[in-house]
Amino acid sequence: MNDDRMEGNWKQFKGKVKEQWGRLTDDDLDVIAGQRDQLAGKIQERHGVARDEAERQIKDFETRNPDTRWR
């Protein structure tokens, strides 16, 4: 997938990510920019969960949002 499409896809799902993980700021989401590992780290940081829990939450999110594409 090219970077323009990835960026557009990320913007589309940015709102859904904020709904799921409400403590993430717009700045956090700009830094994450669709990178799955970055998202897991920010979930850990902002929500105080372990890495495996953050990964589980992301996997659940991906199941509910199958069109999500990560870098």
Image (tube, helix red, strand yellow):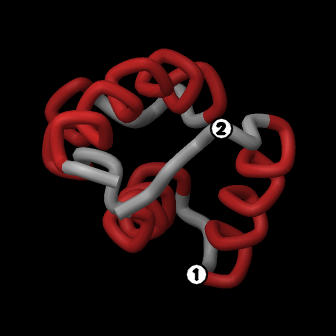
> Which disc number belongs to residue 51?
1
Q: Quick one: quadrant of the N terminus?
A: bottom left
In this view, the residue in front, 13 or 6, is: 6
* Distance Cα–Cα, label 2 vs label 1: 23 Å
Measuring 75% from the left and 42% from the top, which residue is drawn there? 66
> Does residue 4 appear left or right of residue 55 in this picture?
left
State the SS at label 2.
loop
Q: In this view, does 54 lie above or below 66?
A: below
> Does residue 20 appear left or right of residue 4 in this picture?
right
The amino acid type found where label 1 is placed reads Arg
The amino acid type found where label 2 is placed reads Asp
> Does residue 70 appear left or right of residue 30 in this picture?
right
Q: In this view, does 42 lie above or below 26?
A: below
Q: Quickly name the residue at label 2.
A: 67
Q: Quadrant of residue 42?
A: bottom left
Measuring 49% from the left and 56% from the top, which residue is drawn there? 43
In this view, the residue in front, 63 or 4, is: 4
Measuring 15% from the left and 33% from the top, which residue is drawn there? 27
Point out the residue furthest to the front here: 1
State the SS at label 1.
helix
Give the mark nearer the N terminus: 2 vs 1.
1
Query: Mark 2 and 1 residues: CB-CB less than 8 Å, in contact?
Result: no
Image position, residue 2 (x, y; %)? 23, 50
